Image (cartoon, rainbow, N blue to C red):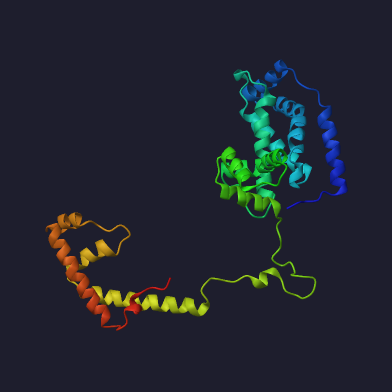
Amino acid sequence: MALIETAEAQRANAGFIRRSMAEPLLSREREFALARAWREQGDERALHQLTRSYMRLVVAVAAKFRHYGLPMSDLVQEGSVGLMQAAARFEPERDIRFSTYATWWIRSAIQDFILRNWSIVRTGTTAAQKSLFFNLRRLRAQIEEASGERLSQAGRAKIAAALKVDVAEVEAMESRLSASDQSLNAGIGEEGDDEWQDFLSDERPSPEEHIVVSHDGAVRSRWLSAALGRLDRRERTIIEARRLTDEGATLEELGQRLGVSKERVRQLEHRALGKLRKAIMENSTLPSDLLMED
């Protein structure tokens, strides 16, 4: 879902990039001092200097993702969020350069933004799919360059093995990356008023079918209620506990509850089911009337 930047936005973006690149680099000692000042004293001036000095890193990472068709300014903005997250979590005592630590946060923030906005259809909902989304083009280009041919099924299998996903996921992602979003209101052909949505079938029940199913369900419920009324207390207890709950009770549990053996519970259940069947069949002569529609 490519977005187009206006000329004014492009000029503002170019100016921001120039200013970011002009910021002086920090020494290790100065970097750690600023990080400690922010972490231990909440010094916002130290935070601003630290993040401004590494805004060039945000720009560099964002530039690597420009081919996804999203505005550079948006990528930089999301990368800046990642930079701020890195600054909030950075621990100077670990003796790791801030740029090394921040790169992961910046890249992660930009990638999440791309996955949310590259298409109106959510892409890459798992870590494996995310890795596939961002590495498929690169791996496909490497394989095609080595073989001199278009990606084959064997090549897709290599990609699947490298990224630890199924071949079917590679094929699905390949299809997604080669297609673009299309409006359902787009016209079909140059002539005529037909739209894509006109040819989509609605597989939901029609209003008439919904009413029939609802009515039949209510009738069956009345039949069952009347049939249960013909059972004695123990029979009804067994049927309700064994047949009318998601997790039916065991014969042993009901035997302990009613003070009888498991075999006696089984006999009572069998007798109760016979009573229910007879009572319900008095209302309908067709066995199909007792079945719910799918």
Q: Using the image as rendered, state which of residue 44 and residue 19 is in the foreground.
A: 19
Tell me which corner region of the image, top left, top right, bottom left or bottom right, holds residue 60.
top right
Q: Is residue 98 above or below residue 247?
A: above
Query: Residue visible at 52% across and 78% down?
Result: 207
Q: Position of residue 15 (x, y in %)?
A: 86, 37
Q: Position of residue 213 (x, y in %)?
A: 43, 76
Q: Is residue 200 above or below residue 159?
A: below
Q: Position of residue 257 (x, y in %)?
A: 17, 56
Q: Is residue 134 above or below residue 25?
A: below
Report how many numbered discs are placed on residues in the image. Answer: 0
Q: Is residue 256 left or right of residue 202?
A: left
Q: Position of residue 105 (x, y in %)?
A: 65, 33
Q: Is residue 54 visible?
A: yes
Q: Is residue 167 left or right of residue 277?
A: right
Q: Is residue 182 above or below residue 80?
A: below
Q: Is residue 164 left or right of residue 211?
A: right
Q: Is residue 9 left or right of residue 128?
A: right
Give the residue furthest to the top.
29
- For the C terminus, which image quadrant? bottom left
Query: Residue visible at 76% across and 31% down?
Result: 55
Q: Using the image as rendered, state which of residue 60 and residue 175 is in the foreground.
A: 175
Tell me which corner region of the image, top left, top right, bottom left or bottom right, holds residue 265.
bottom left
Q: Is residue 229 visible?
A: no
Query: Residue visible at 67% across and 46% down?
Result: 151
Query: Residue visible at 85% across and 49% down?
Result: 6
